[in-house]
Image: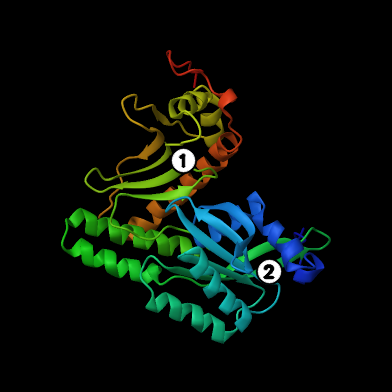
Amino acid sequence: MATELGTLQRVELREVWQHEEYHFTPWLAETGNLAALSDAVGLDLELMGLEVAVGPYAADLVCMDAMSNTPVLIENQLAKTDHNHLGQILTYAAGLEAKTVIWVASRFTDEHRAAIDWLNEITHEDWQFFGLEIELWRIGASPPAPRFNVVCRPNDWSRAVREEAAKAEGNSPTRSFQLRFWTSFRDYRAERKQGAPKPSAQSWQSFRVGRTGFQLEGVVRHSEQKLAVRLYINCADLPIKGVFRYLEARQGEIHAALGFPLVWDELPEGKGSVVYVVRDNCPLDDEARWPDWHEWLSATIAKMDSVFRPLIRPLQPADLPPTDGPALVAPG
């Protein structure tokens, strides 16, 4: 019997959002929607304000990138790009001293795409300009589902590689390997429409997990021929060791949800705490096997995100155990 499949149908944006300021901007500012935008551009965006005053004008959204602790300007429109919005973006970015700019529109004209690409070409690596098209789709009578398509992005996807490569040339073979590995990993995820941080010559790459002070990190250990994925806890708004013990006490349910065990290291003498899983015996010098390692890292990061994110995001101080005694660990 043949499987019956639905048909994707494009939905006009103004069927859902009639007004940019009153409907679309508040929707984009919601936590889940901002997280989807964050994933599309590979940043960790936290909302700072809506319709933020810049002199006599108002910027649609101002966020903070939790990874770099720098402001991010988001300007949106429910139509194709135009010169007015391009001018507003430059004005607002200057007034806010925002070095990361995200322009969201229903469609980018060739001229405005070229303008964003040019800005990325001529600016220092600290500046980032993104252009995203937003679409709505439904299947049959289903609710419309949004999709962000990145149509132009910072040249740091090539610019940072060039600069890191120049640095790595004067450093160890390990740093050179790490840069090549993470560049390949970025390309692997880009082919699958998944975000990834800028490639670097360090041993880890960080991913957002829904709350400042928590991050998932993919780790490559060239000398040991192993990979790891770790949750690093280094929050400022909660007691770090209390968070660790809260999660550790639930390790049985966490391991069951993940389908694999984790190593729990409170790091009693350190500031942060870490929870991780290791994959041993990875022939990392065989570049033909790198897609296998990229797949494992991506799948493990996604799985740990799905389990830890709903535990981390609602945490309040009252939820946490005291940290002046031994940890209470549930069997796991």
| Residue occupying image coordinates x 25% and y 57% | 177
Q: Position of residue 300 (x, y in %)?
A: 47, 44
Callout 2 secondary element: strand
Q: Quadrant of the N terminus?
A: bottom right
- Which residue is under mark 2? 135
Amino acid beneath label 1: Gly
- Number of numbered tags placed on the structure image: 2
Tell me the amino acid under the disc marked 2.
Glu
Which callout, 2 or 1, points to the residue nearer the camera?
Answer: 1
Q: Would residue 194 be seen by someone viewing this image from the given angle?
A: no
- The circle drawn on residue 118 is none
Circle 1 residue: 213
Measuring from the top left, give residue 303's x and y in whole percent: 52, 43
Rendered view: 250 above or below 11: above
Looking at the image, do the residues carrying marks 2 and 1 touch, with CB atoms under 8 Å apart? no
Q: Position of residue 52 (x, y in %)?
A: 62, 60
Does the image show residue 318? yes
